Amino acid sequence: MRAQRLRRRLVRQLVEEDVLHDEAWAEAFATVPRHAFLPRFFVPAGTGWAAVDRGDPDWLDRVYSREVLVTQLDDDPARWDRARAHGPVPGVPTSSSSMPAIMAIMLEELLVRDGDRVLEIGTGTGYNAGLLCHRCGSGQVSTVDIDTTIAAAAQERLASCGYEPACATGDGALGFPAGVLFDRVLCTASVSRIPLAWLEQTLPGGHIVTTLNRPLGGGLVRLTAGEGATAEGQVLARDGRFMPLRAHRLPPLADLPDAAGTQWRPTEVSMSDVLKPQRHFEFFASLELPDVRPVHVEPNGAFALSHPDGSWARTRRTDSGFEAAQGGPRALWDLAEDAHRRWESLGRPSRSRFGLTVNSEEQTFWLDDPQSENRWPLQGLKSDGGSANR
């Protein structure tokens, strides 16, 4: 069967990418039919999105590619039908089947043991829940999603593949509505703050793996639950970034002002240093520059920094290096350069040297040790409301 060959190829690719190591998860990826969970989806088409259906010639190859596959735009289930009938449509992705590489990373970082009871926040297509069921057994898996249409379709597809996890519709940030305690919690969306309900539903010593919804310095964290609503853990070296829970989406920023007439000056720090995770400074920059967000600058495709108070900064390449310009009530690029100097003085720490402490009073990052004097509050939404998609 062609789908089986494509699954085996996908496993080989994930192994070659060095994101899949555990034989149990490799078997899950080789067995669970991703195509059963993706009968239709969107693909980029110019500035919009085209609809792909299971009858299309390239449908199966796309399903078993290494790409993220968008399944919903703007929380609107009818958008796919419009794209199919009338051609590509605009929209912002609000549900997807993640890149298999990121799924493999998160599943391995969960450190699942035989017999563990696992909660998945964000049922989405149901594919990730299928992988969990194959590894842990359907009776050990619970999954929740806020979108009733998405959750119902996922449950039906899971059942068609022989998987019957406990499925619920509700606010994923509140955990599973039945109040069951879990050994592992996996959130396949990102959160601005760690919902305390997850800690309360995780047995002491159990792990929570999620991604942080941060304008800069997002990515994976793994926390170990303590007694009550407490946890402590690490920012993980292996990175992954996801759509946020609905209530954790960041509000839009005002339009960036034109830089015409602004004075430019030389700088030794580039915008790529601040924004690209592989430069290693990005995570530290996020701690030192709270609420600062990257903004896409048209038409040249460059990025700028922006703050809700109206401050902004841009850089550009010159024959001799880089130049920066800034405006608004605070000098954002001066702050970025100060942060870069501090990062260098601390030994240029990468993201894996940072940890996170969570309790009812604080959510705090620290460098190297929970008692370190180098500490930063986790900036983000105070509410625990939200939803998840996967």
Image (tube, rainbow, N blue to C red):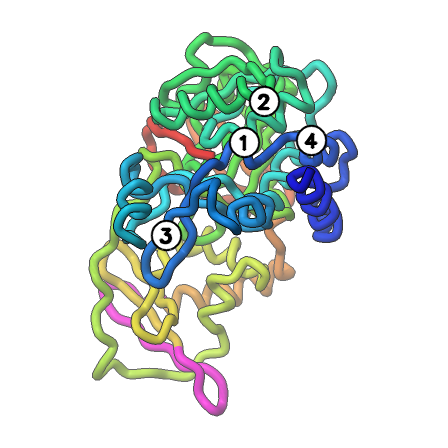
Residue under label 3? 50
Residue ID for mark 1: 36
Earlier along the polypeptide chain: callout 1 or callout 3?
1
The image quadrant where one finds the N terminus is top right
- Picture residue at 51% right of the left edge, 13% below the top: 166
Considering the numbered disc 4 on the image, is that residue within a helix, a strand or a loop? Answer: helix
The CA span between labels 1 and 4 is: 12 Å
Considering only order in the chain, which callout, 3 or 2, is on the residue closer to the N terminus? 3
Q: Is residue 353 visible?
A: no
User: Which label's residue is closer to the chain start, 1 or 2?
Assistant: 1
Q: Tell me the kind of residue under disc 4.
A: Thr
Q: CA distance from mark 1 to mark 2?
A: 8 Å
Q: Is residue 244 left or right of residue 299?
A: right
Amino acid on which disc 2 is placed: Cys
Q: CA distance from mark 4 to mark 2?
A: 10 Å
Residue range (magenta): 316-332
